[in-house]
Amino acid sequence: MKGFQLTLYTQQNRRHQGKMLADWIVSQAMDMGLRGATLVSGIEGFGHTRNLHSHHFFEMADQPMLIILALTENECDALLKRLEEEGVTLFYVKVPAEFGLLGVPVDA
Amino acid sequence: MKGFQLTLYTQQNRRHQGKMLADWIVSQAMDMGLRGATLVSGIEGFGHTRNLHSHHFFEMADQPMLIILALTENECDALLKRLEEEGVTLFYVKVPAEFGLLGVPVDA
Amino acid sequence: MKGFQLTLYTQQNRRHQGKMLADWIVSQAMDMGLRGATLVSGIEGFGHTRNLHSHHFFEMADQPMLIILALTENECDALLKRLEEEGVTLFYVKVPAEFGLLGVPVDA
């Protein structure tokens, strides 16, 4: 299948609708029937706000969070549109990708 | 060098030949003489099985695992073929990539 | 915005100018005014040196470190040039990418 590997960047201390924003996004992806999402935490980093978000030097709450998804073009557009409608501001990186399930017949 | 950044998705509780599947794949990559493989753990996620695999909410054993490799096209084909022959079922994402060693002369 | 997702691979025990190399690179990226960098640690892995760097089996110090950046072509060239001038040797993977801030008007 062709599409994109989408990475969404947030921090552990960002919240949305009473949840950690990263968790909320993973739940949304699940509700939308997307094929998968993985949340990975970073040790430190900085983003467009010019602050250093760091596990080592500052507090845990600032820890960077990456949500990685494999999506068709339509799924990617739908997810980004959904996040925009919810007023979520975050940095995204979209990379052309080919993906699938290994070891499963194409028409399984 | 041109090729792919390949990401293989598994979970901490998946085993193959008496090893954690993720460790087994890293060992295979090493045995095949591939140039590198890195195992990264996720905090939570869900995959094609529709289960939420989570460090927070469920048990550690379900933790998502990502194996990231930089491969030429031939190496990528060989690794995926090897995994299929072993009957390994997993989700993969293949992204076109350029890679190399920085700070080393081309003919080193 | 178009450019690259650049991943730089190092280990926790590599040092440069009295700092952990990975931290030094994140600081450089910040000093160069790049838009962001995220440091992610791996659990285990091996690289061009054929050693298995592992959190589980060996010592923490060998833990793989990935620095992930979204960069325009010029920024990518400038960062790699800067690292080369500093005599830093590391493995890099460059992937074509489209990136931006979601939820912010284009002319914000």
Image (spheres, coloured by chain):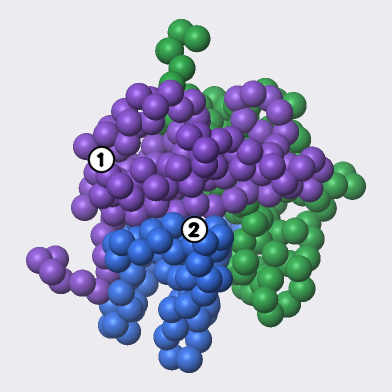
Chain colours: A green, B purple, C blue
**Depth check: C40 or C108 in front?**
C40
Of the residues tagged 1 and 2, which is closer to the observer?
2
- The reply, left or right, for residue A32 in relation to residue C77 is right
Point 61% across, 42% down: residue? B12
How far is mark 1 from mark 2, CA to CA?
Answer: 21 Å
Q: Tell me the kind of residue under disc 1.
A: Glu
Q: Which residue is mark 1?
A: B75
Point 56% across, 60% down: residue? C56
Chain label for disc 2: C
Residue that sits furthest to the front in the current view: B18
- The reply, left or right, for residue A108 in relation to residue A28 is left
- The reply, left or right, for residue B77 in relation to residue A25 is left
Instruction: Give the percent coordinates (x, y) of residue C71.
Output: 43, 60
Chain label for disc 1: B
Q: Quadrant of residue C108?
A: bottom right
Q: Could one spot residue A52 in this view of the protein? A: yes
Q: Circle 2 — which element?
A: strand
Instruction: Give the percent coordinates (x, y) of residue C16.
Output: 42, 85
Q: Which residue is mark 2?
A: C44
Point 69% across, 71% down: residue? A55
Residue that sits furthest to the right in the current view: A18
Instruction: Give the percent coordinates (x, y) of residue B20.
Output: 54, 42
Give above or below for A97 relative to A1.
below
Residue that sits furthest to the bottom in the current view: C18
Q: Tell me the kind of residue under disc 2.
A: Glu
Q: Could one spot residue C103 in this view of the protein? A: no
Q: Residues within 10 Å of mark 1 (few under 14, many from 20)?
A: some
Instruction: Give the percent coordinates (x, y) of residue B107.
Output: 10, 66
Q: Residues within 10 Å of mark 2 (few under 14, many from 20)?
A: many
